[in-house]
Image (spheres, rainbow, N blue to C red):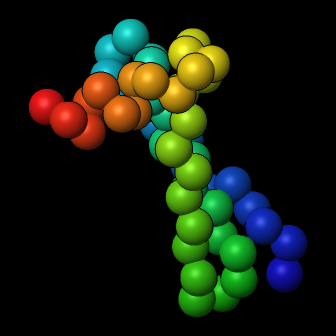
């Protein structure tokens, strides 16, 4: 089965952190956390440390 995007949402109103949920097969979901407005990846590290 091809990976299918089920949903995408943002964790904050500034849309700095995006979560995409994919269905890989009938009983397996995967997710990808992205920071589309921050190319260095520092934002996720900073949020995790608080």
Say left or right for 29 vs 50.
right
Residue 12 vs residue 3: left or right? left
**Residue 12, quarter of picture:** top left
The residue positioned farthest toward the right in the image shown: 2
Percent position of residue 22, x then y? 63, 61
**So how many labels did they put on this image?**
0
Residue in the picture at 33% in, 15% down: 13
Foreground of the two, 24 or 36:
36
Q: Position of residue 30 (x, y in %)?
A: 57, 67
13 shown above or below 24: above
Q: Position of residue 48 (x, y in %)?
A: 25, 39
Identify which residue, 3 or 34, lies in the foreground: 34
> Would you place residue 28 above or below residue 41 in this image?
below
Residue sitting at x 57%, y 13%: 37
Residue 18 place in picture, x, y as percent: 50, 33
Residue 11 against residue 29 in the figure, above or below: above
Q: Quadrant of the C terminus?
A: top left
Is 38 left, or right, of 1 in this rendering? Answer: left
């Amino acid at each position: 089965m091809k990976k299918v995007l089920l949903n995408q949402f943002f964790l904050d109103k500034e849309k700095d952190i995006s979560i995409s949920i994919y269905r890989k097969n009938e009983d397996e979901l995967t997710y990808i956390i992205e920071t589309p407005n921050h190319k260095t990846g520092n934002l996720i590290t900073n949020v995790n440390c608080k």
